[in-house]
Image: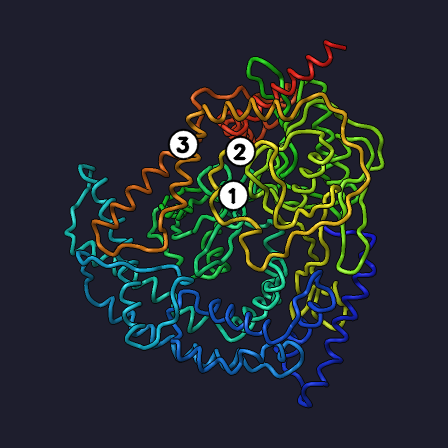
Amino acid sequence: MFSRRSLPFLLLVLGAAVFIGFRSMGNHTTNPPSKYERILHSVGEVLMQGHYSPKEINDQFSKDIFKKYVVALDQDKSIFLATDIEELKKYETKIDDEVLGAPVAFVPAISTIFTKRVPQAEAIAKEFLSKPFDFSKDESLMVDPDKRDFVKSEAELKEFWRKRLKYLVLDRYVDLLENQEKSKGKEGFVKKTNEELEKEARERVIKIMDRMFNRYKLKFSEDDRFNLFVNTITSAMDPHTNFFPPVDKRYFDEEMSGEFYGIGASLREEDGVIKIASILTGSPAYRSGDLTVGDVVVKVAQGEQEAVDLTGYIVTDAVKIIRGKKGTEVRLTIRKVDGTNKMVKLIREKIIQDEVYARSTIVTNGKSKIGFISLPEFYANFDDPNGRRCADDVAREIVKLKEEKVEGIVLDLRNNGGGSLYDVVRMVGLFVEDGPIVQVKDRDGKPQILRDRDKTVLYDGPLTVMVNEFSASASEIFAAAIQDYKRGVVIGSTSTFGKGTVQRQISLDREGATFNPTSDMGSIKLTLQKFYRINGGSTQLRGVSSDIVLPDLYEFSDLREKDDPDALPWDEIQKADYATWKGDFDLNAVRINSLARITSNPTFNLIKTNTEWLSKQNENLVYLNLDKYRDEKKKRSATVKQLESLNKLNKEIDVKPLPAEANRYANDKDRDDRFKAWMKNLSNDIYLEETVNIMNDMISQRNLAINKK
């Protein structure tokens, strides 16, 4: 999202920044700059000239990048020795000089050590995996690398590898034991000895290690290490400023095209594992209900074939084996946030994008007739003047719901990661009279107030907005405006995600600046602006606090913007001039009624108790003793199983399609099945149930006010 008024200025500034970057190189070296140097110098100039709040590129910045990059290169601290880090410390205060124009020396130096250490680690792994492990010993392993230092000697490195490999084998050994226990009595069952199962577990880990070391030696090139280095620098400015090398940019464009058959989930690599980054509404991943953003994809199997373990895989390699032919089955073994594993079967299909569009249904519970609008993202087709826009689509859904004489409207923005700023402004305008909606500020300019200038109000009845931790950016602007105008009630997690910044893709090529699609230097997704509510506070970092908080499964997970140490800070500017909505509901009374229901609701109490318990468990220290490991796993699995059972209501909510749309997909069974599955999920949604209760309270208050008149 960006302000169109400021775009021409930004293009001039950023184009000049790249030009200055090339001119400045002559101040540091008389030799022609290498490609690495051209990229790094240009990145430095673009960051300093264009970033909303650039950190000073000095010795302290250099030290921070040094530390971050060493860990990024060896996330598990299983390759480098402390003596290697000491040897590299001569570059600790030189990285800023490289960014500002000096020859690139740090990446080649650390690459030399890395390529030397990898075969040594591989030899250690092969040695330990050549013989059985003893799981009767009482020992443990700290798996969180942030709580461990780099080992001081090769003897310590060998001991760490022994425990790490023992943990990997134990994890798979326990899976094999449990599967064997479940299979007893089934046709074709053949019991294996514990020794045979341990050997099978080791063989699986051997395959994992072979693949990981092959990747290190054959796939993880010096170019890859340099690209990682540059992205470490850009993301240190803020989490949303990222470097895209040309191959990644092309891959990104392919991802956006949708011309493939898959499951509808995007991936990211984090802490050495592959995680679910987002889930496309209506896709196989979405409909399964078993995948969540943040889940680790542990294994992938093609139907009933042997699963491929993704340890050591990069995202592009993982995507290749998850994608496949239309109608074929892929099986994902995922690790949930609580540490438990689950196998999910999905059928690949071409991802149909219309499920991301706004759609509505009617919810009744015997008291009121309520309209429900789902908006998965703030979409807009900028390339087609006649293309779909979310503001127009939501307006159409409101008209249809008004024709059905609904008494209130619920707008669901859960998991909505944002999108078009222009449409946010227009959409808020559907519910309020003209006035300011959001303030946008670049690093040098005066805040620009974006306003709704249409005095008409399409819908003036009771309104609630559902949010969660994954409601970000444009969703937060909408929720904040509704809250600041006191137009409706925001319901959900304690706060939304907290992304209050704007990014734009900037090419690093000399020619064409921002619009060169064939760049051979790559591009930067650069943070240029910051959003502010009309009350003056930023949505950055803090997000939007819900008016009514519902106990949440992810409340204690570190998933929000505030959990990233490089996130930009919260601040505030002068509030805009606006008049609040003259509504007919008492928020305090509505809140009190809801709190009473939540407090007496055993399901919400269990969600709160169990998620809090899980968050306090020491997930980072794992037992390497078989009995202790199984006991811990059993406790966690039982808690998670109970949480999963809470997703279904004892009595379903009455959710029905609009009469005119009951047979909307009669000629498309797949889409019809997806539409029915969507409504089925809503009918079991405990959060929607309480939102409907809140809406009933608001409707009652309104009716009371009307009767008094």
Q: Residue at x 81, y 31 (%)?
A: 433
Q: Position of residue 399 (x, y in %)?
A: 73, 24
Tell me: residue 15, above or below residue 457.
below
- Which color mode does the image show? rainbow
Q: Quadrant of residue 587?
A: top right
Measure the C-alpha gap from mark 2 to mark 1. Answer: 10 Å
Q: Amino acid at mark 1?
A: Glu
Camera sees residue 111: yes
Q: Identify the residue under disc 3.
A: 606
Q: Amino acid at mark 2?
A: Asp
Classed neighbour count for the residue bearing mark 2: other residues with Cα under 10 Å, few (<14), some (14–19), many (≥20): few
Q: Residue at x 70, y 46 (%)?
A: 537
Instruction: From the viewer's side, name the closer residue of 200 and 235.
Output: 235
Classed neighbour count for the residue bearing mark 1: other residues with Cα under 10 Å, few (<14), some (14–19), many (≥20): many
Camera sees residue 423: no
Q: Amino acid at mark 3?
A: Leu
Instruction: From the viewer's side, name the closer residue of 575 and 516.
Output: 575
The numbered mark, 3 or 2, whose residue comes first in the sequence reads: 3
Q: Quadrant of residue 133?
A: bottom left
The numbered mark, 2 or 1, whose residue comes first in the sequence reads: 1
Q: Position of residue 135 (x, y in %)?
A: 19, 57
* Disc number for residue 671: none
Measure the C-alpha gap from mark 3 to mark 2. Answer: 36 Å
Q: Position of residue 501 (x, y in %)?
A: 68, 53
The numbered mark, 1 or 3, whose residue comes first in the sequence reads: 1
Closer to the camera: disc 3 or disc 2?
A: 3
Q: Identify the residue under disc 1.
A: 349
Tell me: residue 610, above or below residue 121.
above
Q: Are marks 2 and 1 in contact (CB under 8 Å)?
A: yes
* Disc number for residue 670: 2
